Amino acid sequence: MAKAASNEDPSTVDAAGIAKALGTDLDRGLAAAEAARRLAEDGPNEIRAAPRAAAWRRLAAHFRDPLIYLLLAAILIATAAWLLEGRVGWPVDAIVIAVIVVLNAVLGFVQEARAENAVAALGRLTAVTSSVIRDGHAMRIPSAQLVLGDLLVLGEGDAVGADARLVQVSTLRVQEASLTGESEAVLKDTATLGTLSALADKVNMVFKGTAVAQGTARAVVTATGADTEMGAIAEMLEATREQPTPLQREVGQIGRMLGTAVVVIALIVVATILLVQDVRGTRDITTVLLLGVSLAVAAVPEGLPAILSVVLAMGVQRMARRNAIVKRLSSVETLGSASVIASDKTGTLTRSEMTIERVMTASGSTRATGIGYAPHGRIEHQGDELSAGPVFTENIVVLGGGSLASNAELRKTAEGVWEIQGDPTEAAFLVAEQKLGTAERRKRRFLRVQEIPFTSERKMMSSIELDHEHDDQPVVMSKGAPDVLLQWCNRVRVGDDVIALDDAIRHRILADVNTLSDAALRTLSVAYRPLEPGEQAQDGEALEHDLIFVGTVGIIDPPREEAGLAIREAQRAGIRVIMITGDHPRTAARIAADLGIVAPGTPALTGLDLDALDEPAFMDAVRATSVYARVAPQHKLRIVDALQADGNVVAMTGDGINDAPALKAADIGIAMGRTGTEVTKEAARMILADDNFATIVQAVREGRAIFDNIRKSLRYLLSSNMGEVLTVFLGVVLAGVIGLTDPTGAVVLPLLATQILWINLLTDSGPALAMGVDPETDDVMARPPRGPNERAIDSRMWMNVAGVGAVMAMATLLTLDMYLPGGLIAGTHDLDNARTAAFTVLVFAQLFNSFNARSATTSAFRGVFSNKWLWCAIGFSVVLQVAVVHVPFLNLAFGTAPLALDQWLSCVAMASIVLWFSELWKITGRFISGQGAGRKAVPAPTAVD
Ligand code: ATP
């Protein structure tokens, strides 16, 4: 952060004075090395949010958790028991629990750090940028790198990156509501102010956090970071923290509910043991208490929130790699439930590679297939069908006029390749003219003195040119949407003559436009007028009247191939695709039909049509219409509102500054990464780095898959926890039935406290996380969008969780029974051995369950090898389990005893029951839903890879 050193307010110093004070060259800007030096000295141009807490504090925060307090209490109990019993050997239980507490905290810390890093990386991807001139070259840099004295270049839709003194303006209007509350955009100029004025009156300054609504300018940065006007008020503003997403809130609620339930269950278990068994001495009491605590800790899915944020964050990173940059984690969920995608046409559904195909003028129509450029701005083929005569003259005027009333540039690179810069629509005129060979003469003949800019509302633009061949006569050159431009014309050019534009000609021109539009061509017309003496002093827009119409071009802008496929995919997924464009209704209707958005022949609804509708009629129209043309940004806002009022979750694209309100209103506002303005990008929730419609559908797909994966982790964790709770509870209650007794009369438990904590540590982390990166198992795009109020865990999932948990507990207890003498099945092993076998069955059952949990409907065997992370996690868990059973010091720590090979085999077989049960469950479920759906075509779940 920094501020101009001078005591004088920059608004009261003239441009040259400011440049001198800050060492800036008003043509070449700062030297890059000097800018780097200033950045190092003054720090980045950021209004500091609260600094990130130190790592040890964040780690310590993981110990401030009720469950950890419980475990700490358990350590105390175990240590006390060891002390009371005369300090024999080591306080093994206390040590094991302490290690587990630390491991838990470290795991949580690592996961949290991962999620935070992913969010921070996104922040860098979506950083606001500014244009500056350094070393005489224009460049775009992250606004955080702006330094004092930087020469800012501002254009429509730019977010002003720092406070700066204007040194050059062209009809600059700045939206300063965020700073001053003034809702109208303020007209700026460069004149030095005589006295110090209030912020709102400093018209020769621009301020960080405001937005350029219109025009262009250059300005010298006079304050950065906290020294800016925005920085001064920033202390009052809350730093924006990532809010929990709806899913995170739901999971939080479930966690709290389960926490309470589990503590109650743990109390019941402890009470039951105390009632049913003969508890004697401190050893028994501590064993029972430790079991109660461990059960409570193990059964609460405390790892869930961390897993959720990691899964969301990793999903967001994956999306970013595929060009969909999501700004908030919550948008991932919203994307998954999108029911409408409303998209622009130009550049998103089409390729934005514009080629003039036809030129239609009063004397005839020219097919100009030779006039064009191929992708990347290279001119590929030569040869045109134009020849001398009135048509030729008219064509020269159409293409020359279009080129003059434009800001694009056509440049030959060092390799001799033509490249375009700027709006492709405008560049199409330059390219066509270049082909005709008339560009050079036109450039020599005219000199631009003023521009009347294009806006999506006006749908036209003009420039005022001095005509050197006619004594510098000023001429207004206009190009724009034919229907709009024609309203300002009263004459028409025919060859070298100019005649009155009567109704018959007007109709013919409009018929020509319809012909072009029906052929999916984008239409633009060109008109001009020599100005009367003195007229030039008038305000720009006032000059656009009594124009002489010259002709219309038809520009081909081919649809993106992948857009058609993506539209079909979206429709299959129950998502309605809507096209909202500023283009001609017939062009829009034809392209929409070509892309499969509507049936051929369906007309588009125009902005004018919409204006004529009252609220109920508007709602009906929005329900029925999927192509809108000649709309202005305010129509987009109304359409979003209507769609949302109808219960839709709306994703909407936009690029211009005036699209920002509609993007804010939409559930997922999508800005164009390439052509979008900075202001739109700020308003959006997602940025399309490649401007491509197909990327939106891909993002929806990812959003759905991420939501599915979270449900998989939930299903897995909850059913596993249920298995643990039921094992201990039923084990205690049914102890007599399964022969769980101790000849010495000591308290016997189906599992030891440390074993339960072990299971928790092993299965809660690896497999649950691996499920978060699971490839799609069900066909995510073959079902309708999730309702906005649909819960992550529905009653069906709860039933499944209870069923799988019960089977897991039964398999575990049956194993216990099998190896113990007495009970239902008489065995011959001792308690430690039988308990180890049961413990192993429970661990393995959870690992088998991780395959079940990957889909609620599809068999676990489909795509069983597709998730390598899951296999790694399982492999790791198996190795650890073998170690805990066979390594002597772990035997001591976890109360285990080595198992024989046949025992291992039967443990795996017993554990696999959970898999077979789940397969049966799914087959039944599929059968029932198949019956329910009757003969309706239900898309079958498809296999993975
Ligand atoms: P979309 O809204 O799908 O991106 P679009 O680019 O056609 O489509 P606008 O930019 O609002 O929408 O343009 C509306 C109309 O204005 C176009 O159909 C065209 O006739 C005219 N137009 C577009 N660009 C220019 C321009 N640079 N100069 C003059 N007229 C233009």
Image (cartoon, grey):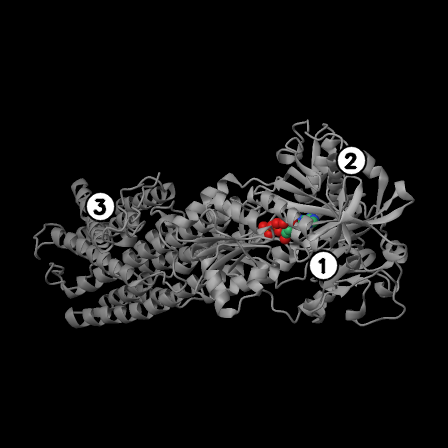
For the residues labelled 2 and 1, say whether their Cβ atoms are less than 8 Å apart: no
First of labels 1, 3 by sequence position? 1
**Residue 646 falls in image quadrant:** bottom left
Q: Which residue is drawn at 84% across and 63% down?
A: 10
Position of residue 62 in the picture relative to residue 583 (left or right): left
* Residue 109 in picture, x, y percent from top left: 47, 56
First of labels 2, 1 by sequence position? 1
Which mark is drawn over residue 212?
1
Mark in front: 2 vs 3: 2
Local secondary structure at mark 1: strand
Given residues 549 and 372, the one toward you in this image is 549
Given residues 254 and 349, the one toward you in this image is 349
Which mark is drawn over residue 439?
2
* Distance from mark 1 CB to nearest ligand 1 atom below 8 Å: no
* Distance from mark 3 CB to nearest ligand 1 atom below 8 Å: no
Which mark is drawn over residue 898?
3
Q: What's the amino acid at mark 2?
A: Ala
Given residues 490 and 367, the one toward you in this image is 490
Position of residue 594 in the picture relative to residue 556 (left or right): left
For the residues labelled 2 and 3, say whether their Cβ atoms are less than 8 Å apart: no
Assess disc 2: are there few (<14), some (14-19) or many (≥20) residues with their C-alpha within 10 Å of its C-alpha.
some
Assess disc 1: are there few (<14), some (14-19) or many (≥20) residues with their C-alpha within 10 Å of its C-alpha.
many
**Residue 356 falls in image quadrant:** top right
Q: Residue at x 66, y 69 (%)?
A: 235
Given residues 282 and 945, the one toward you in this image is 945
Mark in front: 2 vs 1: 2
Q: What's the amino acid at mark 1?
A: Val
Identify the image quadrant of the N terminus.
bottom right
* Residue 11 in picture, x, y percent from top left: 84, 64
